[in-house]
Image (tube, rainbow, N blue to C red):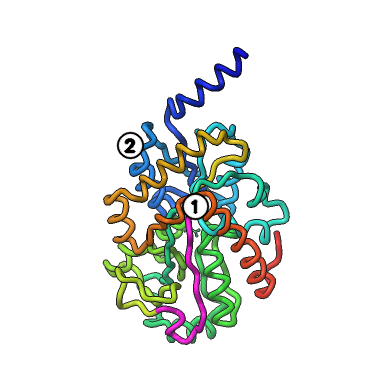
């Protein structure tokens, strides 16, 4: 009975020290940008600091696995995006099961992507880009954040749309990929607006199109892929929050409440809006995230098998 009492009071005290939010990509990138704003917005309700830990590599699977294997005590939470649901169709041993390794907390934001190039890349619009890439595909490099990352998924769809294979260069996140694009060491990148908006509006990179079906209000001059002749081309990068399976329900409930309060914070909403992201307030709950994962895993599986992408 003594231990039960101890466990009960430890639970009541959650959190009594800082919580780690694991971002499975490098600092300064799009997922990290969302995480850092969210960590701040959740703090008042959670009553503790949330420390962002960047654990990049292998398309986000390394950091995701770290949380899958962590103590289920609420002190390690995962902030990951759509790539969460792609690993099972891309890796022979992804290390986690998207259906059973985690307890979902809720959806966070939906973020469109942009197709961009180094500032001196020859093509000036999406039509020219398609032609140039078709002619020069063996000389072009596409940066991404590893197999299964959003930038990789977008690249697979781009290669399909253009009917070519592209040489890809993996990074631990798209922050370092962006650095190399700015330094003109790579040619192309497809990345979330949460990382690209500033570089696009300040003219430091060339931008060709957005991957949403509608134009992005903060980047009104960028056409959609769909309106540019690539009918149905759509990638929306939803982000979610998870804890390890087995985390006590009372701890999950505190995180759900803090997430919902964080998404309602006007400062968080403003920041996301500036970066072209949509805050998914009404889906910030376990049911919505669970449904999303169940819909997304088979959808990506179908896309990869159609594109002939093999597991590695
Ligand atoms: N946006 C990146 C990707 O998944 C990851 C990141 O650096 O946040 O491609």
- Relative side of 35 to 64, left or right: left
Label placed on residue 240: 1
* Labels 2 and 1 touching (C-beta < 8 A): no
- In this view, the residue in front, 175 or 140, is 175
* Residue on which disc 2 sits: 44
Q: Secondary structure at mark 2?
A: helix
Quarter of the image where one finds residue 201: bottom left
Tell me the residue at 53%/85% (across/down).
135
Tell me the residue at 51%/68% (across/down).
142
- In this view, the residue in front, 198 or 279, is 279
Q: Quadrant of the C terminus?
A: bottom right
Q: Who comes first in sequence, dot 2 or dot 1?
A: 2
Q: Position of residue 248 (x, y in %)?
A: 56, 33
Return the residue found at the far front. Answer: 1
Q: Secondary structure at mark 1?
A: strand
Q: Which residues are magenta?
A: 224-240
Vertical side of 127 occupied by 216: above or below = above
Vertical side of 134 occupied by 214: above or below = above
- In this view, the residue in front, 287 or 194, is 287
Tell me the residue at 36%/32% (across/down).
47
């Amino acid at each position: 009975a003594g231990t039960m009492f101890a466990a009960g009071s430890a639970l009541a005290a959650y959190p009594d020290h800082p919580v780690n939010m694991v971002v499975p990509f490098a600092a300064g990138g799009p997922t990290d940008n969302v995480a850092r704003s969210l960590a701040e917005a959740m703090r008042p309700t959670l009553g503790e600091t949330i420390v962002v830990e960047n654990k990049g590599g292998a398309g986000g699977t390394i950091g995701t696995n770290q949380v899958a294997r962590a103590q289920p005590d609420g002190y390690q939470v995962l902030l990951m995006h759509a790539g969460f649901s792609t690993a099972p169709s891309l890796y022979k041993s992804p290390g986690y099961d998207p259906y059973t390794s985690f307890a979902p907390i809720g959806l966070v934001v939906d973020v469109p992507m942009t197709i961009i190039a180094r500032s001196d890349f020859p093509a000036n619009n999406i039509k020219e880009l398609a032609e140039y890439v078709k002619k020069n595909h063996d000389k072009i490099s596409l940066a991404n954040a590893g197999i299964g990352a959003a930038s990789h998924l977008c690249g697979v769809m781009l290669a399909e749309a253009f009917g070519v294979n592209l040489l890809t260069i993996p990074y631990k996140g798209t922050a370092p990929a962006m650095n190399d694009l700015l330094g003109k060491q790579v040619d192309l990148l497809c990345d979330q607006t949460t990382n690209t908006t500033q570089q696009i509006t300040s003219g430091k990179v060339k931008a060709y199109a957005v991957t949403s079906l509608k134009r992005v209000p903060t980047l009104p001059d960028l056409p959609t892929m769909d309106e540019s002749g690539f009918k149905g081309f759509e990638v929306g990068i939803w982000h979610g929050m998870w804890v390890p399976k087995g985390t006590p329900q009372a701890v999950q409930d505190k995180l759900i409440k803090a997430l919902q309060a964080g998404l309602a914070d006007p400062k968080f909403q403003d920041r996301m809006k500036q970066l072209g992201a949509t805050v998914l307030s009404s889906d910030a709950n376990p049911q919505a995230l669970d449904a999303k994962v169940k819909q997304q895993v088979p959808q990506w599986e179908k896309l990869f098998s159609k594109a002939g992408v093999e597991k590695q």
